[in-house]
Amino acid sequence: MSFPEDIFTEQEPDPDTLANLGPLTRLAGIWEGQGGVDINPKEEGPERRDFTERIELQPIDAQSNGPQLLYGLRYHTRILATDEEATFHDQTGYWLWEPATGLVMQTLSIPRGQVAIASGHAKPTDTELVLTAQRAAAAYGISSSDFLEYAFRTDAYRIEVVYNPDGTWSYVLDTTLVVRGRSEPFLHRDRNTLKKVAEPTPNPLMLRRKGGKS
Ligand code: HEM
């Protein structure tokens, strides 16, 4: 990791985010998956739940941190149990790509009182992404409410995304929980495969350039 002395001079961004997403290009759009599987911690032990999922991943305008130029997608995931009327996971955040360094980041916010930022590196043509975050890390950490710290301490997060040859993509998501009163960490694992149901909407600056509404 090396950063420039000049932390203020910005680069000129390209207004067309969809053309600059590198290894995130395949994620842009609206996706659904019926075959999700969740393993979560219950008092009696690990519980398996099947779920259906919808993810919207829409391009945002490029963002600059001084010389660091990021292109990205804003996402919202909704997960419903297959066997009952229950939304058991809701998540929002951003997937970000820095073309200059190959840095990939995912920020996540979960309405349990939890946020995290995971990182990894990839090349534009990669068909697999791996990102990780750790609790108590100064960069790329996990931060939780005091109840979660007490009862379900979240020590680590890892997501692996694979782009399949048929245009779908799959993920395996591992969240390591230290559940109060248990001697072994619990592996809270989720997996699903997503199929595209709609194309993404171009980002606001691109819509303005084309004379559309922003
Ligand atoms: C596809 C993604 C996910 C699904 C479907 C999912 C689903 C669930 C379910 C069903 C529970 C049990 C809730 C209950 O007992 O009332 C749970 C617990 C939990 N999840 Fe997830 N989860 C997902 C991802 C995550 C991620 C990414 C994190 C954190 C980085 C996370 C953190 C937790 C924590 C801390 C708990 C324990 C709280 C509790 O059981 O009350 N989950 N999750």
Image (cartoon, rainbow, N blue to C red):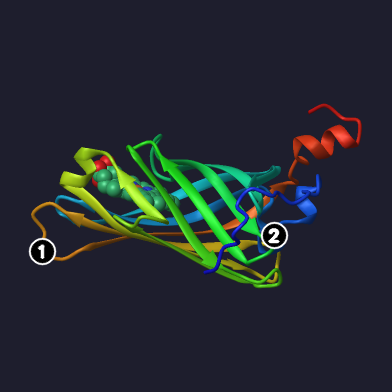
Extreme residue in the right direction: 211
Could you tell me which secondary element the residue under label 2 belongs to? helix
Residue 158: mark in rendering? none
Please state the total of marks drawn on the protein image. 2
Q: In the image shown, does 8 or 20 lie closer to the viewer?
A: 8
**Is residue 209 left or right of 87 when viewed as pictured?**
right
Dot 1 or dot 2: first in sequence order is 2
Residue 155 percent coordinates (x, y): 28, 58
Sort mark 1 into few (<14), some (14-19) or many (20+) by Cα contacts within 10 Å: few
Q: Which residue position holds label 2?
A: 26
| Residue 181 in sight here | yes
Relative to 44, residue 84 above or below: above
Q: Residue at x 17, y 46 (%)?
A: 151
Residue 152 percent coordinates (x, y): 21, 49
Q: Amino acid at mark 1?
A: Ser
Residue 211 percent coordinates (x, y): 91, 31
**Is residue 160 left or right of 114 when viewed as pictured?**
right
Sort mark 2 into few (<14), some (14-19) or many (20+) by Cα contacts within 10 Å: some
Relative to 14, residue 184 above or below: below
| Residue 50 in sight here | no
Q: Residue at x 45, y 52 (%)?
A: 117
Relative to 164, residue 213 above or below: above
Mark 1 → mark 2, Cα distance in angstroms: 40 Å
Q: Residue at x 69, y 71 (%)?
A: 165
Residue 183: mark in rendering? 1
Could you tell me which secondary element the residue under label 1 belongs to? loop
Extreme residue in the front direction: 5
**Is residue 94 left or right of 133 when viewed as pictured?**
right
Residue 212 percent coordinates (x, y): 87, 30
Q: Amino acid at mark 2?
A: Arg
Q: In the image shown, does 8 or 13 lie closer to the viewer?
A: 8
